Amino acid sequence: DQQVKQNSPSLSVQEGRISILNCDYTNSMFDYFLWYKKYPAEGPTFLISISSIKDKNEDGRFTVFLNKSAKHLSLHIVPSQPGDSAVYFCAAGGTSYGKLTFGQGTILTVHP
Amino acid sequence: EAGVAQSPRYKIIEKRQSVAFWCNPISGHATLYWYQQILGQGPKLLIQFQNNGVVDDSQLPKDRFSAERLKGVDSTLKIQPAKLEDSAVYLCASSLHQRGNEAFFGQGTRLTVV
């Protein structure tokens, strides 16, 4: 039962353009969503989060959008840089649910 | 601030052998998680501790996996006996509270069972 899904295994973007990574969830108990970035041979690193009381959260080049009715969130990276090339994981948890559930990940490649 | 420490970084064992992984969370973090990440998949929660008590171990294969967190700080995850399908990266993470905030991950232990 895949409660958090990232349907795009990979995404390729030109440097300077926008990267959009998508994530869908099914469990309506989730009310807290996070994005993690992972480089090879390292653990995931927290990037940005959003609570279900918001529909947008911004941190520098990174913006997360949440559409609760569609149970969908997305991560926008503008402008994309080659150093952003990594695997991006979407995760969901909640104040009443506890554990973090991860999606399968999307490999982002930003070309110079 | 020191991050989550894990050891060893890499381990190769034969099937049916046993193996143990160690984790030291960030100081003051009450919640500790062990995740299994199989190649090409997202991390899957094996067990979650709140201090030294188990909050969730619903996805832990209890016939071969065990974990403990003595004194609510360090934790050990053990596999006995190992199977080929246990080959994965085992990630330890910690967070300040049980719910509603981000978890910080260690570098992981890459286990290869041959």
Image: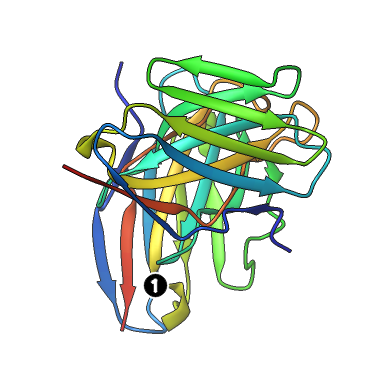
**Labels in figure, total:** 1
**Image quarter (top left, top right, bottom left or bottom right) of the C terminus of chain B:** bottom left
Is B84 placed left or right of B107 in the picture?
A: right
* Quadrant placement of the N terminus of chain B: top left
- The spot of residue B51 in percent (x, y) is 60, 29
Nearest the viewer among A105 and B105 is A105
In the image, is residue A100 above or below residue B47? above
**B31 w.r.t. A42: above or below:** above
Secondary structure at badge 1 equals loop
For disc 1, the chain is B
Residue A44 in percent (x, y) is at 39, 41
In x, y percent, where is residue B20?
38, 59
Residue B39: tell me if it is visible.
yes
Q: Amino acid type of disc 1?
A: Ser
Task: Give the side of residue A70 with respect to residue B104, left or right.
Answer: right
Asked if residue B29 is positioned above or below residue A93 in the image, the reply reads above
**A106 or B22: which is nearer to us?**
A106
Q: Residue at x 41, y 20 (%)?
A: B27
Extreme residue toward the left, this view: A112
Q: Which residue is mark 1?
A: B87
Q: Residue at x 71, y 47 (%)?
A: A25
Between residue A110 and residue B88, name the one nearer to us.
Answer: A110
Say whether residue B30 is visible.
Answer: no
